Amino acid sequence: MNVKHLAIFSGFGILTVILAVVYKRKKWSLQKTKKKKMTLYWFDNFRSRRCEWLITELGIQSDVELISINPQDPDQEKLANYRKVHPHGTIPAMKLDDETVIIESGAICLYLADLYGRLVPDLSQKHNYYNFVLYACSTLDEILENLYNQWIDTLLEDQDTALIDKNVRKFQTFGRYFTKVLTGKQYICGNRFTAADCVLGYNIWWASTMRNGVLLNEFPVLLDYYDRLQCRSAFQRTFTEEFK
Ligand SMILES: N[C@@H](CCC(=O)N[C@@H](CS)C(=O)NCC(=O)O)C(=O)O
């Protein structure tokens, strides 16, 4: 074997070692990134729908285990166990792969969108993004909760008309505000659908379920927005089919 052959053979040898190291490292890093599933505690029609919808939009169903919890379940042991996850026992909660827990629907949506780096707007629209996620989960949820409690959960003769009127007026204020925000654009953050639309879109769906959508009927811009949301296949899979 002359010097030339020796150089070629040792070149192959070095290359083989490098490839073996790269392969081993890659395998190790794949094993390391292979994550445990997250768990979403959900119940039909509850605020967990925001998260179910976003999970479907992101196409990450295989990363999330679903556990259905009915807060009215007569099985007290099951509810006591759930309170170890969510101190208030309300829905939803999400247990992450490191066993930490998020107990607010809006926070779960913000977290998932960040984790997967999708359905998040760029900085120029972040003000709308944060504003409407928090607005939906606080101001708007409270208005709809009051109306739901009165219209759906309270006998007609026991309903508090002053409370109903006050919350209808508050919803109308939202309707006018959101009409202005949406004018000239398709979604909360412009013409790109984001996680904020899953969060606030849930409120629009919720409003549509009460009294034949009377709250929405006077706001054509909101109705158009709701039409756009309903056209999305992830919306249809979440709201009109079983989540699983
Ligand atoms: N701010 C919480 C509200 C959670 C909440 O109140 N969930 C309701 C269903 S939509 C619930 O679990 N209610 C049952 C109960 O209060 O016992 C969130 O957005 O996640």
Image: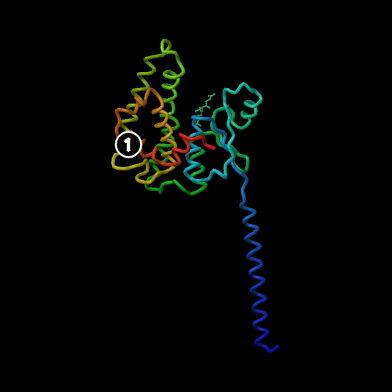
10 in relation to 239, above or below: below
Location of residue 3 with respect to 155 vertically, above or below: below
**Front residue of 194 and 132:** 194
Q: Dot 1, how many residues are within 10 Å of its Cα: few (below 14), some (14-19), or many (20+)? A: few
On the rendered structure, is 96 left or right of 155? right
Side of 78 where 145 appears, left or right: left
How many numbered discs, if any?
1
**Looking at the image, residue 100 lies above or below residue 78:** below
- Which is nearer the eye, 38 or 124? 38
Residue lying at the far front of the rendered structure: 241
Coordinates of residue 68 in the picture (x, y in percent): 58, 32
- Name the residue furthest right: 1
Q: Name the secondary structure under disc 1.
A: helix
Estimate the x, y position of residue 85 in percent, counting from the top left: 61, 32
What x and y, as percent, mark residue 222? 33, 34
Quadrant hosting residue 81: top right
What's the image's color scheme? rainbow
Quadrant that contains the C terminus = top right
Kindly identify the amino acid type of the residue bearing the numbered disc 1. Asp
**The N terminus appears in which quarter of the rendering?**
bottom right
The residue where tag 1 is placed is 224
Q: Position of residue 202 (x, y in %)?
A: 43, 33
* Residue occupying the far top of the picture: 157
* Residue at (62, 57) in percent of width and height: 29
Is residue 189 or residue 68 the one in the foreground?
Answer: 68
Going by the image, does 82 lie left or right of 147?
A: right
Q: Quarter of the image holding residue 128?
A: top left
Kindly give the residue lying farthest to the bottom in the view shown.
2
Which residue is at a point 31% across and 28% down the rendered structure image?
A: 217
Q: Residue at the location (47% across, 43% down)? A: 57
